[in-house]
Amino acid sequence: MAPPTPVLTREQLERQISFPSADGCQLKSLTQFQCQIFPPGSGEYLCIPFKRLFEECVVAAGASKNTPSRFEVTSPLTNS
């Protein structure tokens, strides 16, 4: 299992790192599922999808090499 990752809003992230402008960025989405055994002990799963949004931006990483970086931009309104 992956370690917990803090979820930050775009505004919180901008305070921590040099966030690239939206120019030249592409919006990407990922659908994840949160699953639970329901009813408990039945062996049947109930899975609810939720969408996560990312901006993929090309960030200069050297003299001749550009590397795409992804920044999560999911907001509470994304899945409402």
Image (tube, rainbow, N blue to C red):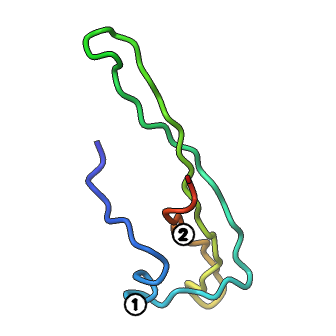
Q: Which residue is mark 2?
A: 73
Q: Which residue is mark 1?
A: 15
Which quadrant holds residue 12?
Answer: bottom left
Q: Secondary structure at mark 1?
A: helix
Quote the CA–CA distance across marks 1 and 2: 14 Å
Q: Secondary structure at mark 2?
A: loop
Q: Position of residue 58 (x, y in %)?
A: 65, 78
Task: Classify 74 as above or below 33.
Answer: below
Relative to the observer, which residue lies in front, 76 or 66? 76
Relative to the observer, which residue lies in front, 68 or 25? 25
Q: Position of residue 59 (x, y in %)?
A: 60, 82
Identify which residue is drawn at 59% across, 50% down: 30
Residue type, mark 2 in image: Val
**Horizontal arrangement in the rendering, residue 37 relative to residue 66 (left or right):** left
Q: Position of residue 7 (x, y in %)?
A: 37, 65
Residue farthest along the top direction in this orientation: 42
Residue farthest along the front direction in this orientation: 80
* Category of crowding for the residue at label 2, using alpha-carbon neighbours closer than 10 angstroms: few (below 14), some (14–19), many (at least 20): many
Residue type, mark 1 in image: Arg
Task: Classify 45 as above or below 28.
Answer: above
Identify which residue is drawn at 42% across, 87% down: 17
**Horizontal arrangement in the rendering, residue 77 relative to residue 26 (left or right):** left
